[in-house]
């Protein structure tokens, strides 16, 4: 399997575990400031870029919440 494909699968598997909760968090944070979908996509892109730097996939939720809060 290609390294990029493997990376994508690891990221998606980790994100799948936190998707519902993260979406709810973004809905609360983005309320009347920006479209929720834009915030989620921005966070996903940024988290994917740095995913290999996380010590373990369990840190993904906290990392993405920090990204959303800072946006």
Image: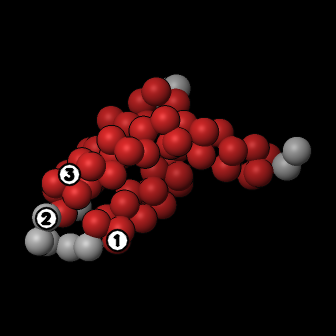
Q: CA distance from mark 2 to mark 1?
A: 12 Å
Label 3 with label 2: CB-CB less than 8 Å = no
Q: Which residue is mark 1?
A: 38
Mark identifier at residue 31: 2
How packed mark 2 is, by other alpha carbons closer than 10 Å (few <14, some 14-19, many 20 or more), is few
Q: Which residue is mark 3?
A: 69
Asked whether the viewer can see residue 63, the reply is: no
How packed mark 1 is, by other alpha carbons closer than 10 Å (few <14, some 14-19, many 20 or more), is few
Which of 30 and 64 lies nearest the eye of the viewer?
A: 30
- The nearer-to-camera label among 3 and 1 is 1
Residue 57 position within the rendered picture, expressed as x and y whole percent measured from the top left: 52, 30
Residue 19 position within the rendered picture, expressed as x and y whole percent measured from the top left: 43, 45
Q: Earlier in the sequence, mark 3 or mark 2?
A: 2
Label 3 with label 1: CB-CB less than 8 Å = no
- For mark 1, give the secondary structure: helix
Asked whether the viewer can see residue 23, the reply is: yes
């Amino acid at each position: 399997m290609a390294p990029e494909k493997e990376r994508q699968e690891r990221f998606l598997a980790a994100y799948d575990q936190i998707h519902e909760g993260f979406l709810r968090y973004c809905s609360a944070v983005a309320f009347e400031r920006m479209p929720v979908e834009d915030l989620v996509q921005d966070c996903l892109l940024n988290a994917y870029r740095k995913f290999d730097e996380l010590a373990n996939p369990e840190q993904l939720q906290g990392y993405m919440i920090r990204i959303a809060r800072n946006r």
